[in-house]
Image (cartoon, rainbow, N blue to C red):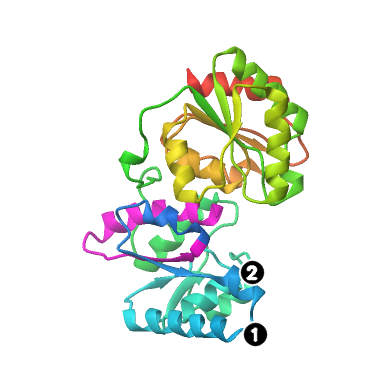
Amino acid sequence: MGDVVHAIPVLSDIRKACPEASIDWLVEEAFADIPKASPLVSEVVECAVRRWRKKIFSKETWAQIGELKGILESKKYDVVIDLQGLIKSAILASWTGQPVSGYDKDSIKEPMASSWYENKFAVSKQESAVQRCRELAALALDYCVVGDPEFSFRQEMNGPVEKRVLFFCNTSRKTKLWPRENWIELGKQLRSLGFSVDFSWGSEEEFDRVSSISRSIGASSRVLEKMSIGQLMNIIGTSAAIVGVDTGMTHLASAMGKPTVGIFRDYPINLVPLVGNGKKHSLGGPGTCPSVEEVFAAFKEVTQ
């Protein structure tokens, strides 16, 4: 999901360089709400790689793959860019039947993916994820990256703000998690300032975890029902602030311009910093565990 969020600024860059461009976005179905929230995307084409992998021998799976190939080939794109740099994304891009642009083997996450590209470009791995996407698109379309990244989400997604903070406690890697007792203490401190706290979740394991934390915080805390990304974007839009671990939803909140605190525990902040027009504070890094006091101070900083 983070890869999708980090690529959004490419839309504004391309539109500035090529005002008449029509831009389609191929994306995993679970994340389709993100590009759909940008008016700069002409059409969102959905794939279901995660679902297909679970039923790879199913006739229905192969029928859906064939249908997607047909859709992509029929578009006759002038330019195809693989911003993700994975084998799966390179294969999907190749289904367009048009030359694909992507990272060269020394710049890419999965070097083998580069073999599917006709046009290969060197982009430093020391750049942030957002900047890498911007530079690759600029090289593919022969323009220069100018200015700060712009996230072209529809403004109506940010409604009247309530005195509510949204916690994103869960992530796909346990090494990214912040301790349960820290969330509880932070929630109680926010409650003392008059804020209520909301929790989101995706799996049953995540539901159990946030329910336990919420109960310990008390009456000012609630666990939301299971929501799509689009529904969570609406919740983000009306929240006073967001506090989360290094997960796609935290990065999305920052990209939407909301006051955001990001807690990093196993990845260099400089490679995936919080980006957006709002106030934001990233803290931590590999092998660290930011204290409640540090996170609370960061929260006060972004909400002042």
* Residue 85 against residue 35 in the figure, above or below: below
Whether residue 292 sits left or right of residue 70 in the image: it is right
Q: Is residue 285 visible?
A: no
Q: Nearer the viewer, residue 231 or 247?
A: 231
What numbered label is drawn on residue 236? none
Residue 256 x %, y %? 42, 40
Quadrant hosting residue 49? bottom right
Whether residue 257 sits left or right of residue 285 in the image: it is left
For the point 59% across and 70% down, the residue is: 51
For the point 71% across and 31% down, the residue is: 213
Q: Is residue 255 visible?
A: yes
Residue 17 in magenta stretch: yes
Q: Nearer the viewer, residue 246 or 145?
A: 246
Residue 164 x %, y %? 51, 25
* Residue 264 against residue 160 in the figure, above or below: below
The residue pinned by badge 2 equals 110
Residue 242 x %, y %? 54, 32
* Residue 228 against residue 79 in the figure, above or below: above
- Kind of residue sitting beneath label 2: Glu
The residue pinned by badge 1 equals 57
